[in-house]
Amino acid sequence: MVAKAVLITRPEGQGAALGKAVEALGLEAVYQPVIELEPYAELPAEQHSLIQDLDYYQHIIFVSSNAVRFAMPWLENQWPQWPVGINWYAVGSGTARELKRYGLEPLTPGIEMTSEGLLKLAPLSEPQGDRVLIVKGDGGREFLRETLEQRGAQVDRFFCYRRKAVQLPPQGLANLLDRAQVGVVLISSGEGLGNFLALLSPAETTKLWAVTLVLPSQRVAAVAQEAGFKHLIVADNASDEAMLRALKQWQNTQETFE
């Protein structure tokens, strides 16, 4: 088998389990986050009011496990007992696991862990007149909100943390990829891909076209292809399990052509 390293780009402190699984496959795990997460020390008044009015919502959607981790201290402080009559949602299995730790049983879209998958769930298919709260970090896609509003829902967003692109010295990422002999990069989101590309100059990107990118959806893969990357594997979603299945697919290809 070709001995190459795998770059894990999850936020700081969130790639260890994936890294151990990568190493169990006989590959080296290299870590370089491309997104930094920051909690809010204080919430604006309008955000506080969303928490206070939690029982007015019919649907509350958490778009990531980070949204759960950053939002729950605020929510629990206001609601020691959860209001009844609310449909709770998790975009993926990891997010659902986090919510279950708080005694909630969220609806999930199954293997299609995306906004598109959530929107296929029956309670969100006709939310005319319903109030929806989306719990998320600042920035990111607005597709979920826009689609729900088009379907007649009143949508609010609770921003519970900030996302920032990681800053590296010039050539920092390219040098790391070269030094570690990275053959595969695992990317969890479209924003992560954008940040990854922003850390590379056009010349550096051209040199990396032989690197394989594992991406969480066809939508994100289309962006990578447009940027010039030739070797793409689309995972079922952004979960550790799906990323590992895609990585094994790459590994089997390497063994076939060894």
Image: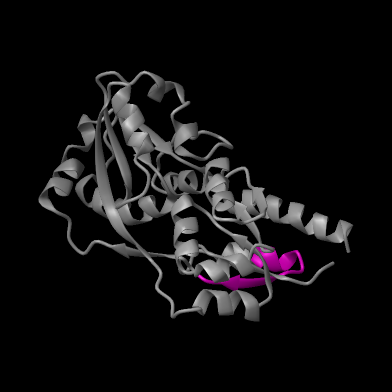
Q: How many marks?
A: 0
Kindly identify the residue that appears in the image at 36 percent across and 51 percent down. Answer: 67
Q: Where is residue 166 in the image (x, y as percent from the top left)?
A: 41, 69
Kindly identify the residue that appears in the image at 57 percent across and 66 percent down. Answer: 205
Q: Which of 123 and 185 is in front in this view?
A: 185
Q: Where is residue 78 in the image (x, y as percent from the top left)?
A: 20, 47
Residue 229 within the magenta-colored segment of the rendering: no
- Image check: 255 left or right of 173? right
- Image check: 48 left or right of 164? left
Residue 24 within the magenta-colored segment of the rendering: yes
- Image check: 228 left or right of 164? right
Kindly identify the residue that appears in the image at 55 percent across and 36 percent down. Answer: 112
Q: State which region is magenta.
A: 20-32
Q: Position of residue 125 (x, y in %)?
A: 41, 21
Position of 89 relative to 238 (above/below): above
Q: In which quarter of the image is the N terminus?
A: bottom right
Q: In which quarter of the image is the C terminus?
A: bottom right
Kindly identify the residue that appears in the image at 68 percent across and 64 percent down. Answer: 22
Q: Which of 84 and 19 is in front in this view?
A: 19
The quarter of the displayed image where residue 217 is located: top right
The quarter of the displayed image where residue 31 is located: bottom right
